[in-house]
Amino acid sequence: MTRMKYERVLLKLSGEALAGPYNFGIDPTTIKVISQEIVDVVEQGAEVALVIGGGNIFRGVSGSAKGMERSAADYMGMMATVMNAVAVQDNLEKLGLSTRVMSAITMREVAEPYIRRRAIRHLEKGRVVICAAGTGNPYFTTDTAAALRAMELGAQALLKATRVAGVYDKDPEQFPEAHLYKTLTYIQVLQEKLRVMDSAAISLCMDNDLPIIVFDLFEKGNIQRVTAGEAVGTLVQGG
């Protein structure tokens, strides 16, 4: 069994990651691959909580930009995250994991209400806790929800899974010469406006000394390597 540096982690998945090669919806092949990666980490002894975005179904910010009232658009985005959470739960349980979807918006027929002490107890029992509906409040992103839940649940690191190898000085999908940072401080991220997470999430992690690790979700075994403490992707920590 691989020794885990981080015994309890919060994994932040974007909704777009679940869409795979498509621009919308959930790609069954992609979600199976991601689920197997999570299974491998749990089998190594790590306790895992998830926060999943909803951008593959609906993005509150884009809805607001198109004329919707911001709060209404954000609530629609939260409901999209619940759909993603149920899809991930289904795949994880087919692979033998015990899971709980816990929603910040009450939906008792499909999810437990999010209660911090209950979520911690689920983690202690080896269940994967899938936190849905963001913070339950408009104007807060799922990045901020991930930082908040990581703190509440006592995670030792926040793992931000992306489509690229880590944090770059510019978009590597548009600029092949983009520079990959191996380490960054929270202040650097904020001052240079690097696209890691939104500023509220970064500030929350900085105030509570929670390391953020940004890495390529689709490199096989990366979640396990990160949890074991290997130098994968970009590590954000320190002043």
Image (cartoon, helix red, strand yellow):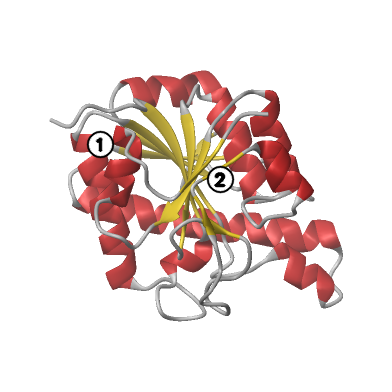
Residue 196: mark in rendering? none
Q: Which residue is mark 2?
A: 107
Instruction: Determine whether 220 is above or below 26 in the image.
Output: above
Image coords of residue 115 (percent x, y): 55, 26
The answer to whether 96 appears left or right of 156 in the picture is left
Q: Pointer 1: residues within 10 angstroms few (<14), some, or many (20+)? A: some
Residue at 70% across / 50% down in the picture?
A: 198
Q: Which picture quadrant has residue 87?
A: bottom left
Q: Nearer the viewer, mark 2 or mark 1?
A: 1
Q: Pointer 2: residues within 10 angstroms few (<14), some, or many (20+)? A: few
Q: In terms of depth relative to the viewer, which is nearer, 105 or 221?
A: 221
Residue 42: mark in rendering? 1
Q: In terms of depth relative to the viewer, which is nearer, 33 or 84?
A: 33
The answer to whether 47 appears left or right of 23 in the picture is left
| Residues at discs 2 and 1 in contact (Cβ within 8 Å) | no
Residue at 53% across / 71% down in the picture?
A: 172
Image quadrant where one finds the N terminus: top left
Q: Which picture quadrant has residue 39?
A: top left
Image quadrant where one finds the C terminus: top right
The answer to whether 73 appears left or right of 42 in the picture is right
